[in-house]
Image: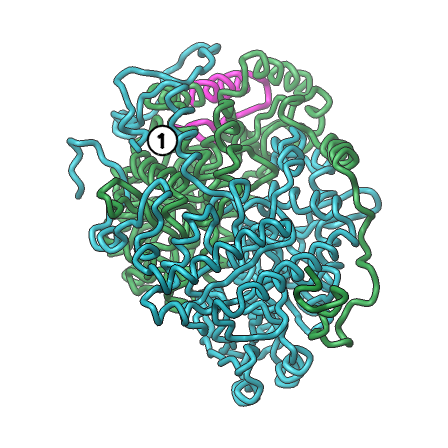
């Protein structure tokens, strides 16, 4: 495929702009401050339409087919939510327009906060974080402020070895020393290691529950107790909330802070890698530290409260990824209490069904009922020289998006599979068939898998050269890099 | 399905959750709604807001009214794009990968930098990440921000700096621009970076080159922040003025304002700082058949590989908003983008000249500006705004509470969206108020 820049033809114009309807004036800007050239392509409107339509056709989304990317909850994104977020009163509202003219936006934010608090068992929410990782950072910043206010200096954050990479990265950015907690043979937190490492200088234990193996942390009550006894706080990475909606709540498990990924659990589309949204809920003692402003209600009037002396401040301009918040709000309103619980139940049913079908052909390192996802190992296939990477690429030729691979790090040759609740039995069966056929091919014709995919727009890219000689941008032929 | 798992009820799959923490009641949420009921309900809520189609609006301050060509939402709405996720599987993600590569190229071209990443959350958090990045490069812990930076951006920098253990100092302004003498005094060999917005919060074009000279004299990095990127159709790219890192907000490029988000952060740098950059990068390479293709690359900087040693914790970014910006820039092209910048500058000049004809309104600054400017009002700007609402006009941003000494001042913005007719209507309404 050509690049948009390679379609450029001198003096071709695609845009139609209004004529200048005011008398033209001198700009009053020194010539030295003005640019001599605006190096953008010159293409027609239809050139642009065909170019990006062609690009869309070589991209795979949930609407293209089954997308069991573990830990990412690639559920179907209801189209009505897109229509709602595009309503002019929402999509064109300015964050600084007078509060009296923003009551609809503020109402949505206020009600969404309350709904999320109920769903998670937390007392208060901020909707400001733009994604899960920023939510983690906000959660840890609040913990830091909380301890600082109490005059306590705690320097460590405990993170299980099965955690998402963002957990240790967020802790490090927040200035904490990261202490890794090993998992036990059942895939949960190793309790004796926890007792050792939960010392008085631990600020927070970050835990994903259900964890990245798709397993519910059976000792969660005990874990919370141990951490709390030492004065530490419990942080829930809510990336896997889809498994327990309406069934159990982080707030009831002893968690003090939790973030949610609205683009996962609450059906907002993932957008090719964002925008996401990562609201954070806290128990009452941490509420004073929430980012500002908070959205509050006085009678029938909603308002932004900036008067928050203990707030950690802001992590983003304005109030969060509003349009994503609107989609999550619409999803909650559409499903209601029973619908949300049913979503979790079906997500868990689908995952267990698929796990059962694939167990045997693939190693299942932690063999017990899973929640919304499960992790297989490609160990058996590796014996035939077929890597998990080859299994993933093989799936592409069957028309499926591969699962998350090589994560969590504690499973060798990991395949992390999350079917979600929005898939029917037929899809799960077709996927299972493909996986079983691939397992057979791994024995009989491994070379075929190593050469996969054959049917995709491109074959495997040369990632090594991409990293060794990075080509990260287009340049005009006559333009010399520095 | 339950038979094949060997269970009789779905509850059995949840038996590993301790009785003590199982929720024994339905969630206290409102009942479910059909699609029709949902749409009606949300339309009702949305109509409690003012929308730009019913009001003439002269408000910018970090979120700008620009016309979005129909092809932008149309192409962004291709669900192969918006229902995909981070392109981990390159072979079936070439569409979004190539679009991001084009986005990186566009940002480099507009900013005059060597490399740009695949996007950040927004301009403010991109600026904070740039401060952390500059500190990691220079091994210095002090960050100096100009007070002409958007107040909320400065707050975000402070929040990140607090977490990261960086010290933040602020330098004042003079005539609406960063004070060169204060900058001389306020920086030292301890300074990691100086953060400057251009055009600044008051709409004024900063003397970036001069600022860069001072900053580089300290061995510090110049971080330029572009909050209104349509200005780059007119103004010299920051890279040409000595900026070492350029960050900004891409909302103006084809993204709706949506009450403040999702918008689009961008971050670009000199080649030498490539390995210190946060966030995802897409590179061009070839497949096994020698065909051009694209992959995420240099991932050893990132959290999923480096965990606590990563350059940032950012994972999901704003890919779809970056796609919108890419399509927007392609659609406008060289000619359109240049014209757009000029329209903005001209509308703002007309608006300013007309307001200054009115009795009681005074110029606050005289330096060159782009599409925003500050005027002093004969009455409290918040009260003026209130009066304007009745005329179907949303006025500018009152600066009271944001800047000391500018209590009676009003930050106004004009873009291509403000027809002469609307500007004249505002002037007549203000004339009535001034009387």
In the figure, A445 relative to B73: above or below?
Answer: below
Q: Please name the residue that numbered disc 1 is placed on.
A: B232
Q: Which chain is cyan?
A: A
Which residue appears at 53% of the width and 79% of the height?
Answer: A154
Which residue appears at 61% of the width and 18% of the height?
Answer: B426
Which residue appears at 74% of the width and 32% of the height?
Answer: B43
Q: Position of residue B404 (x, y in %)?
A: 55, 44
In the figure, A458 relative to B342: above or below?
Answer: below
Position of residue A85 in the picture relative to residue B418 (left or right): right
What stretch of residues is rendered in magenta? B345-371
Q: Position of residue A365 (x, y in %)?
A: 50, 75
Asked whether A246 falls inside the magenta stretch, the response is no
Q: Position of residue A395 (x, y in %)?
A: 43, 53
Report helix, strand or loop for mark 1. Answer: helix
**Residue B142 showing in the rendered view:** no
Residue nearer the viewer, B2 or A319: B2
Total marks drawn?
Answer: 1
Q: Position of residue B415 (x, y in %)?
A: 49, 23
């Amino acid at each position: 495929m050509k690049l948009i820049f390679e379609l450029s033809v001198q003096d071709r114009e695609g845009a139609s702009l209004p004529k200048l309807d005011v008398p033209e004036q001198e700009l009053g800007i020194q010539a030295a401050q003005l640019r001599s050239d605006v190096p953008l392509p010159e293409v027609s409107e239809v050139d642009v339409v065909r170019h990006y339509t062609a690009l869309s056709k070589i991209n795979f989304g949930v609407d293209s087919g089954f997308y069991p990317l573990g830990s990412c909850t690639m559920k179907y994104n209801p189209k009505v939510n897109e229509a709602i977020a595009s309503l002019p009163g929402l999509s064109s509202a300015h964050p600084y327009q007078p509060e009296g003219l923003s009551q609809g936006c503020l109402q949505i934010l206020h009600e969404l906060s309350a709904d999320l608090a109920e769903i998670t068992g937390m007392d208060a929410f901020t909707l400001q974080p733009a994604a899960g990782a920023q939510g983690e950072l906000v959660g840890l910043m609040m913990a830091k402020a909380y301890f600082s206010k109490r005059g306590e200096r705690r320097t460590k954050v405990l993170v299980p070895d099965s955690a998402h990479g963002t957990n240790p990265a967020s802790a490090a950015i927040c200035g904490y020393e990261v202490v890794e907690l090993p998992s036990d043979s059942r895939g949960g937190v190793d309790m004796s290691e926890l007792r050792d490492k939960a010392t008085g200088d631990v600020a927070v234990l970050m835990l994903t529950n259900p964890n990245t193996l798709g397993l519910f942390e059976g000792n969660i009550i005990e874990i919370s107790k141990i951490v709390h006894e030492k004065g530490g706080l419990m942080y829930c990475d809510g990336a896997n909330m889809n498994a327990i909606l309406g069934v159990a709540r982080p707030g009831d498990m002893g968690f003090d802070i939790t973030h949610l990924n609205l683009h996962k659990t609450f059906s907002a589309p993932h957008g090719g890698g964002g925008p996401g949204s990562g609201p954070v809920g806290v128990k009452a003692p941490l509420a004073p530290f929430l980012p500002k402003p908070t959205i509050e209600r006085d009678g029938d009037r909603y308002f932004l409260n900036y008067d928050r002396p203990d707030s950690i401040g802001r992590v983003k301009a304005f109030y969060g990824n509003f349009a994503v918040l609107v989609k999550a709000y619409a999803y909650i309103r559409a499903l209601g209490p029973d619908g949300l619980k049913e979503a979790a139940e079906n997500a868990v049913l689908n995952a267990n069904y698929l796990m059962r079908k694939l167990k045997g052909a693939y190693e299942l390192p932690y063999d017990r009922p899973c929640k919304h996802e499960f992790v297989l190992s490609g160990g058996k296939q590796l014996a035939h020289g077929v890597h998990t990477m080859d299994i993933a690429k093989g799936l592409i030729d069957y028309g499926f998006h591969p699962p998350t691979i090589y994560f969590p790090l504690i499973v060798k040759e990991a395949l992390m599979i999350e079917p979600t609740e929005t898939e029917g039995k037929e899809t799960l069966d077709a996927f299972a068939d493909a996986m079983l056929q691939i397992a057979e091919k791994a024995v009989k014709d491994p070379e075929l898998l190593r050469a996969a995919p054959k049917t995709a727009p491109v074959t495997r890219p040369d990632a090594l050269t991409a990293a060794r000689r990075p080509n990260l941008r287009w340049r005009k032929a006559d333009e010399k890099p520095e | 399905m339950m038979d094949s798992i060997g269970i009789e009820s779905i509850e059995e799959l949840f038996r590993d959750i301790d009785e003590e923490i199982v929720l024994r009641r339905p969630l206290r949420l409102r009942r479910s709604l059909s699609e029709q009921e949902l749409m009606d309900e949300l339309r009702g809520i949305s109509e409690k807001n003012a929308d730009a189609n019913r009001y003439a609006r002269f408000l910018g301050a970090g979120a700008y009214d620009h016309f979005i060509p129909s092809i932008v939402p149309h192409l962004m709405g291709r669900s192969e794009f918006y229902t995909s996720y981070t392109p981990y599987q390159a072979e079936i993600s070439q569409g979004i990968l190539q679009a991001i590569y084009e986005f990186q190229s566009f940002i480099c071209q507009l900013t005059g930098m060597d490399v740009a990443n695949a996007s950040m959350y927004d301009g403010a958090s991109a600026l904070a990440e740039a401060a952390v990045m500059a500190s990691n490069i220079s091994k210095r812990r002090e960050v100096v921000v100009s007070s002409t930076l958007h107040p909320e951006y400065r707050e975000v920098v402070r929040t990140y700096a607090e977490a990261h253990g960086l010290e933040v100092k602020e330098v004042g302004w003079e005539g609406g621009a960063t004070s060169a003498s204060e900058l001389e005094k306020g920086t030292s060999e301890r300074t990691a970076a100086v953060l400057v917005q251009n055009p600044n919060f008051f709409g004024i074009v900063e003397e970036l080159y001069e600022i860069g000279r001072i900053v580089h004299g300290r061995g510090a990095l110049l971080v330029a922040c572009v909050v209104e990127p349509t200005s780059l159709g007119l103004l010299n790219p920051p890279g040409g003025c000595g900026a070492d890192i350029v960050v900004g907000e891409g909302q103006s490029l084809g993204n709706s304002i949506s009450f403040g988000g999702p918008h689009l952060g961008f971050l670009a740098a000199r080649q030498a700082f490539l390995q210190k950059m946060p966030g995802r990068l897409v590179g061009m390479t070839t497949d096994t058949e020698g065909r051009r293709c694209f992959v995420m690359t240099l991932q050893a900087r990132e959290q999923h590989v480096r965990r606590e040693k990563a350059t940032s914790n950012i994972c999901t970014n704003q890919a779809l908003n970056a796609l919108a910006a890419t399509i927007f820039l392609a659609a406008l092209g060289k000619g359109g983008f240049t014209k757009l910048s000029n329209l903005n500058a001209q509308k703002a000049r007309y608006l300013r000249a007309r307001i200054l004809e009115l009795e009681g309104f005074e110029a606050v600054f005289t330096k060159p500006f782009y599409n925003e400017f500050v005027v002093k009002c004969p009455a409290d700007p918040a009260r003026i705004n209130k009066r304007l609402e009745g005329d179907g006009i949303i006025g500018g941003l009152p600066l009271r509470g944001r800047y000391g000494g500018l209590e009676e001042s009003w930050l106004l913005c004009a873009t291509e969206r403000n027809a002469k007719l609307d500007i004249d209507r505002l002037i007549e309404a203000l004339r009535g108020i001034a009387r």
